[in-house]
Image (cartoon, rainbow, N blue to C red):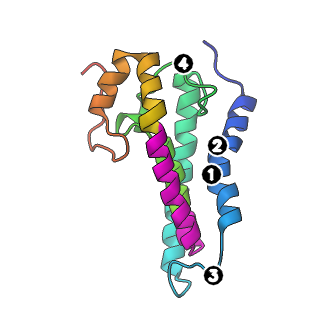
Amino acid sequence: MSNPSLLRHLRDILLLPFTMSVVVPYFIYNPQRRLLLTNDLLLKIFGLAVGLLGIFMLVFTISLFGRFGKGTLAPWSPTQKLVIVGPYRYCRNPMITGVLSILIGEACFFNSLSILQWAGIFFIINTVYFIIKEEPDLEKRFGEEYRIYKKNVPRWIPKLRGYKQGK
């Protein structure tokens, strides 16, 4: 089991989170469809903070996939080991939470109803995908270890106490 190359990681980052959080918002952004009537400085500051938190979460979770999971974030290059460290101890999908935070941050920063709507669509698509495809695949790949993890760690809303494997 070797770590995936940096090029594989970059390819997968560009194809998935970069496309969802930069390319799609760029094409759907419409300055006429605003969240608020005015361009509020507090909304920009909030958006920047949430977006930066999302970027940090995304980078951190991608690094965990490479270091501990021996794979990338992409379904065509999945991890070889179940990742249950860092934020994965508190919720099962912190990487998607990171991308969602980036989208919400962009929506607030750019005062964009279109990007906020895209964030909602992104969340629904991922929820359906995880229930129908990813979770059953993880159960097949990791068996009882994943079933126990799934039973103890929520999909989206983090628990206050982290899951400890084997306890």
Residue sitting nearer the eye, 11 or 133: 133
Q: CA distance from mark 4 to mark 2?
A: 19 Å
Query: Crowdedness of circle 3 by 10 Å Cα count: few (<14), some, many (20+)?
Result: few
Mark number displayed over residue 32: 3
- Residue 88 spot, x, y in % from top left: 41, 35
Name the N-terminal-most of marks 4 and 1.
1
Amino acid beneath label 3: Gln
Name the N-terminal-most of marks 3 and 1.
1
Q: CA distance from mark 4 to mark 1?
A: 25 Å
Q: Residue furthest right?
A: 7
- Report whether residue 7 is seen: yes
Vertical comparison of 136 with 48: above or below: above
Residue located 33% across and 30% down the image:
150
Q: CA distance from mark 4 to mark 3?
A: 46 Å
For label 2, the residue is: 16
Mark number displayed over residue 80: 4
Amino acid beneath label 4: Gln
Which secondary structure, mark 3? loop
Residue extent of the magenta highlight: 105-129
Q: Quadrant of the C terminus?
A: top left
Contact, CB < 8 Å: mark 2 with mark 1?
Answer: yes
Q: CA distance from mark 2 to mark 3?
A: 28 Å
Name the N-terminal-most of marks 4 and 2.
2
Amino acid beneath label 1: Met
Q: CA distance from mark 3 to mark 1?
A: 21 Å
For label 1, the residue is: 20
Which secondary structure, mark 2? helix
Q: Quadrant of the N terminus?
A: top right
